[in-house]
Image (cartoon, rainbow, N blue to C red):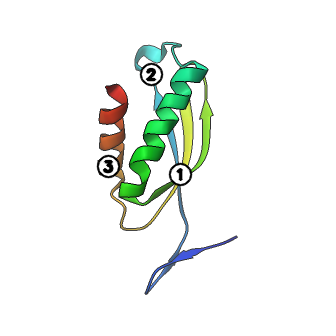
């Protein structure tokens, strides 16, 4: 296992995020999944987030991401949801 570090600490932070479509409607196709992943990868460098795994289904997406301790997860998710809703 490779740990991340900064000047004064060692850490390994993984988050498992499940993004669900409203009313669990089955609208996620391969094209939509790829576009959602592109948006995620576009926003992630700003917030020090690294995408580890992306598993789409018809009504939700499982995302495994790695972050730093100073990452504000709520701001990242707000930015992602705003960008992907457009």
Residue at image position (43%, 38%) is 39
The answer to whether 1 is drawn above or below residue 18 in the figure is below
Residue at image position (34%, 49%) is 76
Q: Mark 1 points at which residue?
A: 65
Q: Name the residue under label 2.
A: 21
User: CB under 8 Å between callouts 1 and 2?
Assistant: no
- State the separation of the CA atoms marked 3 and 1: 14 Å
Judged from the image, the secondary structure of the residue bearing numbered disc 3 is helix
Residue at image position (60%, 22%) is 30
Q: Looking at the image, which is closer to me, 73 or 47?
A: 47
Image coordinates for residue 82, horizontal then vertical, percent? 29, 34
Label 3 crowd (10 A; few <14 / some 14-19 / many >=20): few
Quarter residue 48 falls in? bottom left
Quadrant where the C terminus is found in the figure: top left
User: CB under 8 Å between callouts 3 and 1?
Assistant: no
Residue at image position (55%, 30%) is 34
- State the separation of the CA atoms marked 1 and 2: 19 Å
Q: Residue 14 carries which label?
A: none
Label 1 crowd (10 A; few <14 / some 14-19 / many >=20): some
The answer to whether 64 is drawn above or below residue 56 in the figure is below
Number of marks: 3
Which numbered disc flags the more N-terminal residue, 3 or 1? 1
Image coordinates for residue 64, horizontal then vertical, percent? 57, 47
Label 2 crowd (10 A; few <14 / some 14-19 / many >=20): some
Image coordinates for residue 73, horizontal then vertical, percent? 36, 53
User: CB under 8 Å between callouts 3 and 2?
Assistant: no
Which numbered disc flags the more N-terminal residue, 1 or 2? 2
Judged from the image, the secondary structure of the residue bearing numbered disc 1 is strand
Q: Name the residue under label 3.
A: 74
Which numbered disc flags the more N-terminal residue, 3 or 2? 2
Quarter residue 58 falls in? top right
């Amino acid at each position: 296992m490779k740990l991340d570090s900064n000047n004064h600490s060692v850490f390994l932070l993984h988050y498992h995020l499940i993004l669900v479509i409203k009313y669990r409607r089955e609208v996620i196709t391969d094209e939509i999944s790829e576009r959602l992943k592109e948006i995620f990868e576009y926003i992630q460098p700003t917030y020090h987030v690294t995408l580890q795994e992306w598993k789409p289904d018809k009504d939700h997406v499982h995302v495994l991401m790695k972050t730093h301790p100073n990452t504000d997860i709520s701001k990242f998710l707000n930015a992602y949801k705003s960008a992907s809703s457009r």
